[in-house]
Image: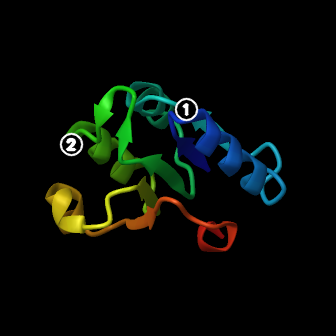
Amino acid sequence: MVVVEDDPIISWNLRKQLEPLIPGGVKYFDTQEQARIYLRSNRPDLIITNLRLLDGWIEKSYYSALKSASQQILILTGLRDERLHPDLASAGEHSFLYKPFTSLQLL
């Protein structure tokens, strides 16, 4: 599993919830570029990524790298309306998890 999240509080919360389920099996990154480098040679079962990271909104090349690396993508966002990110809304093969989210929603 790969988590790409730049907010240290959200990243800590995800780590706290995921580590008991997948001990040592989660890789964490805080930029698209770090994740993209890792995904060139790794194929995780699930990628959890924030819609907007320190290096900007999800770029098409980053999203393509995600889709090439995994069939399961979970996008974290505070934007409640999928029309605000039409490139991703029409792409299909992912799910959105809206912030703030509960542990139950994440699981």
Nearer to us in this view, 107 or 47? 107
Colouring mode (rainbow / by chain / secondary structure / one colour): rainbow
The location of residue 105, given as percent across then percent down, is: 60, 72
Q: Mark 1: which secondary structure?
A: strand
In this rendering, position of residue 55 left or right of residue 19: left
Q: How many marks?
A: 2
Which residue is at 56% across, 44% downward? 3
Nearer to us in this view, 12 or 91? 12
As drawn, 22 above or below 81: above
| Amino acid on which disc 2 is placed | Lys
Q: Residues within 10 Å of mark 1 (few under 14, many from 20)?
A: some
The residue where tag 1 is placed is 29
Residue most extreme to the bottom: 104
The location of residue 103, given as percent across then percent down, is: 68, 66
Nearer to us in this view, 70 or 105? 105
As drawn, 34 above or below 84: above
Q: Residues within 10 Å of mark 2 (few under 14, many from 20)?
A: few
Q: Mark 2: which secondary structure?
A: helix
The residue where tag 2 is placed is 60
In this rendering, position of residue 38 left or right of residue 54: right
Which residue is at 27% across, 69% downward? 92
- In primary-sequence order, the first of circles 1 and 2 is 1
| Amino acid on which disc 1 is placed | Phe
As drawn, 101 above or below 4: below
